[in-house]
Amino acid sequence: MQKITASTKVCEVLNEHPELIDYLMELRLCRADTGPDNIMSWELSRAAAEEGLNLQSLLLELNKRIQE
């Protein structure tokens, strides 16, 4: 996976970067929702909005962590 963007799905981030699981759990973006419309299948833009997170800050932090 290249750069993480607003349209990247939460499950794609986790599949490509399992080292981010703990961080995403802290933000409540990685959880055991069930059903066809769960947070894991959402784009980061929607997930961030639902959790009241600043999307740009989230994207900067995620991309910073995959560069390290």
Image: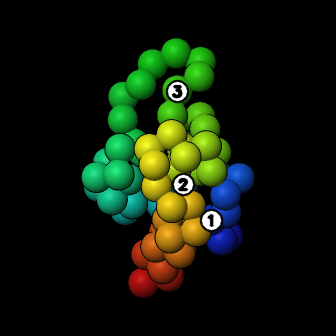
Type of residue at label 1? Ile
Residue drawn at (52%, 26%) of the image: 38
In this picture, residue 59 sits left or right of residue 24: right
Mark 3 surroundings: few (<14), some (14-19) or many (≥20) residues within 10 A:
few
Type of residue at label 3? Asn
Give the percent coordinates (x, y) of residue 40: 51, 36
Residue under label 3: 38
Q: Are the residues flagged by discs 2 and 3 in contact, CB closer than 8 Å?
A: no
Residue drawn at (59%, 22%) of the image: 37
Dot 1 or dot 2: first in sequence order is: 1
Label 2 sits on a secondary structure element that is helix
Q: Name the one closer to the observer, 50 or 13.
A: 50
Residue drawn at (36%, 35%) of the image: 31
Label 3 sits on a secondary structure element that is loop
Give the percent coordinates (x, y) of residue 59: 55, 67
Checking the image for residue 4, the label placed there is 1
Between the C-alphas of marks 1 and 3, the distance is 20 Å
The reply to whether residue 34 is in sight is yes
Q: Which of marks 2 and 3 is in front?
A: 3
Q: In which quarter of the image is the N terminus?
A: bottom right
Checking the image for residue 13, the label placed there is 2
Q: Are the residues flagged by discs 1 and 2 in contact, CB closer than 8 Å?
A: yes
Q: Quadrant of the C terminus?
A: bottom left
The reply to whether residue 12 is in sight is no
Q: How is the image coloured?
A: rainbow
